[in-house]
Amino acid sequence: MRKNKAFTLVEIMVVIAIIAIISFGAVTVTQGVFEKQRVSKTQTIMKTLNAALKEYQLDTGDFPGGNTNGSITGLYGILDSNVNARIKLAGLPGDCVIPFNGMAGNSVAIYDGWYASDDHSITPDLNDNLGGGGSGENEPMLYIYRKNGNFPVIRSAGKDRIFNTADDIVSSEL
């Protein structure tokens, strides 16, 4: 009797199917991990900014307002000018603070976990913030000043990059 040492087509197809299923599962798990990492990073950024805002308010009696309303680009510079708030800002992840050459000159934008990640598939439009009358499209985060000493709100559009949807991350909810 002669033994055939070759694999049959069915055996090869079964092995390929098993490899495909394992690969799909690994990709799905990996994407979920990256998504949780971005959410966590955004929450860390917001908590750090909240701490810096508290220090700024303790020193000045109010929160940054006026021309920063709606824009995250001017907030870092204002907080950085206060010694105690600057200490808190040191806790921000390094890749979330990015120089921005905008209409008002050079400033710094604070990016959320999606823009600060290695995924730069969406180019932020820092001049199109909601507070300035724009749509807020592709804005990394918004700073919302609330009058009468109410604590400001920082909002990230989340994964879909569209504000006021279910995946938004809001500092007041942390």
Image: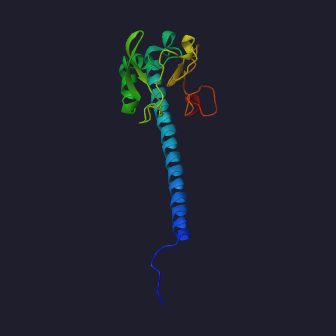
Judging depth in this view, the residue of 23 and 92 nearest the camera is 23
Q: Taking 148 as reference, is 166 above or below it?
A: below
The percent coordinates of residue 167 (x first, y second) are: 60, 34
Quarter occupied by residue 148: top right
Taking the view exactly as shown, the residue that stands out farthest to the bottom is: 1
Q: Taking 1 as reference, is 62 above or below it?
A: above
Q: Taking 166 as reference, is 1 above or below it?
A: below
Quarter occupied by residue 150: top right
The percent coordinates of residue 109 (x first, y second) are: 42, 21
Q: Taking 44 as reference, is 83 above or below it?
A: above
Relative to residue 98, is residue 165 drawn left or right?
A: right
Point 54% across, 50% down: residue: 28
Quadrant (top left, top right, bottom left, bottom right) of the C terminus = top right
Relative to residue 24, is residue 104 drawn left or right?
A: left
Q: How many marks?
A: 0
The percent coordinates of residue 114 (x first, y second) are: 48, 33
Judging depth in this view, the residue of 37 and 15 nearest the camera is 15
Judging depth in this view, the residue of 136 and 19 nearest the camera is 19
The percent coordinates of residue 96 (x first, y second) are: 41, 30
Task: Look at the image and name its color scheme.
Answer: rainbow
